[in-house]
Image: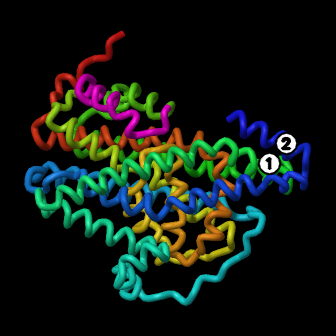
Amino acid sequence: MGMLVLGIVFGAVAGANATAISWVGDIFISLIRMIVVPLVFVTLVSGVIAMGDPKRLGSLGIKTLALYMGTTLIAITIGLTIATIVQPGVGIDISGAEAKVLPPAKSLEERLIGIIPTNPVAALANGDMLSIIFFALMLGAGILISGEKAKPLARLFDSGSEAMLKVTHIVMEMAPFGVFALIAKVVGTGGIGQLLTVVPLAGAMVGACLLHVLITHGAIMKFLLKLPPARFFRDITGAQLVAFSTSSSSGTLPVTMAVAEENLGIKPAVASSVLPLGATINMDGSGIYVGILAVFAAQALGVPLALEQYLLIALAATLVSIGTAAVPSASLFLLATVMGVIGIEDAQTFLIVGFVFPFDRPLDMIRTVVNVTGDLSVATAVAKWEGELDEDTFRRPAVE
């Protein structure tokens, strides 16, 4: 936050001369671009492997995965709807960006066939993200089904995922300097008033997150589980506060598990399997944000979106949310994946990333709260359906 303020002051004082340090921001954006493909690939494969033995998971695993993917899709739909109504990108001037006309639309059949890579290595080299996602999911499933014989490969991807997360942390160590340079350039070239242009984007994201938490997870409690939503939201505030402060679903996991068992009455058998999986693949807040950012970018670049493009954004954001690294601002790394499916090039996408990144930290804190709330909601549902929920604990009166 300090570097954000300093960047605003420097940009206001230096004016157009602030572009002299824009190379620092360019280096940071290049570092992000460098890690996107390997980060998505290895974390997706590792995320699928983390689901465990499908035979052991049985009905519990099917219910968990269905709920996680279903709530993520709902979250993204809410985000796209809010972004379409609010239109946060209309009238935004992104320095260096030009309006782009989409290539001739392909049929749905051609797009689906195009997702399957004829050469996975070429897809990795060319950054064809949907093909990379498809191959990563298939490879992860293959390793999972192979069991003991594929354990060495599973360990390799687990190690690779850890290594890429460390690389991501190294890149994020440069974030304060990137924020300083990027915000100084925005203020220096567009004036202080340019900062107000991000308000509709932030408002759309916060509004979508609130709607998703209250409506989607409130409905799961009230209508699917016949449990009081107010008790659920009251009892998970401890985990939400930690999620807000850390911006990390994985970092919040110990508190999330404690809240699940002690406050919600979820038995350890469910809490210890559903919640770690959720911290890996359930990214409702990230899905909302990536969907809204995609619409924001299309509007800012003058790219018209038809129903087919919205469906492709929803599909790509749902799939890519599985590979969202549990580190701050990881959602921004994946924007290029979603933008690629509607014909927006990486160069233009990362202009959007550079514009939004300085303001991302507080939004990331909110996204993580949504992610953790979704983990606990799904865990509660699975626990009740599996007879692993102590409803007396869940319904007990608040301790004054």
Q: CA distance from mark 2 to mark 1?
A: 6 Å
Mark 2 — residue? 10
Is 281 located above or below residue 375 in the figure?
A: below
Q: Is residue 184 left or right of residue 259?
A: right
- Please say if 128 is above or below 381: below
Q: Is residue 53 left or right of residue 181?
A: left
- 84 relative to 267 in the view: left or right: right
| Residue 293 sits in quarter | bottom right
For label 1, the SS is helix
Q: Position of residue 110 (x, y in %)?
A: 39, 88
**Which percent across, then down, holds residue 229?**
33, 34
For badge 1, the amino acid type reads: Ala
- Say how many tags the image has: 2
Q: Is residue 226 left or right of residue 359?
A: left
Local secondary structure at mark 2: helix
Q: Residue at x 29, y 45 (%)?
A: 220
Q: Quadrant of the C terminus?
A: top left
In the picture, residue 382 is in which quadrant? top left
Mark yes or no: residue 311 visible: no
Q: Is residue 191 above or below residue 136?
A: above
Question: Which quadrant is home to the N terminus?
Answer: top right
Label 2: how many Cα within 10 Å (few below 14, some 14–19, many 20+): many
Three-letter amino acid code of the residue under disc 2: Phe
Span colored in magenta:
246-264
Which numbered dot is residue 184?
1
Query: Upstream in the sequence, badge 2 or badge 1?
Result: 2
Cβ atoms at labels 2 and 1 below 8 Å apart: yes
Residue at image point 71% right, 33% down: 2
Residue 84, label in figure:
none
Find residue 269 and report its horizontal and vertical position in percent.
14, 36
Q: Is residue 294 visible?
A: yes
- On screen, residue 106 above or below 36: below
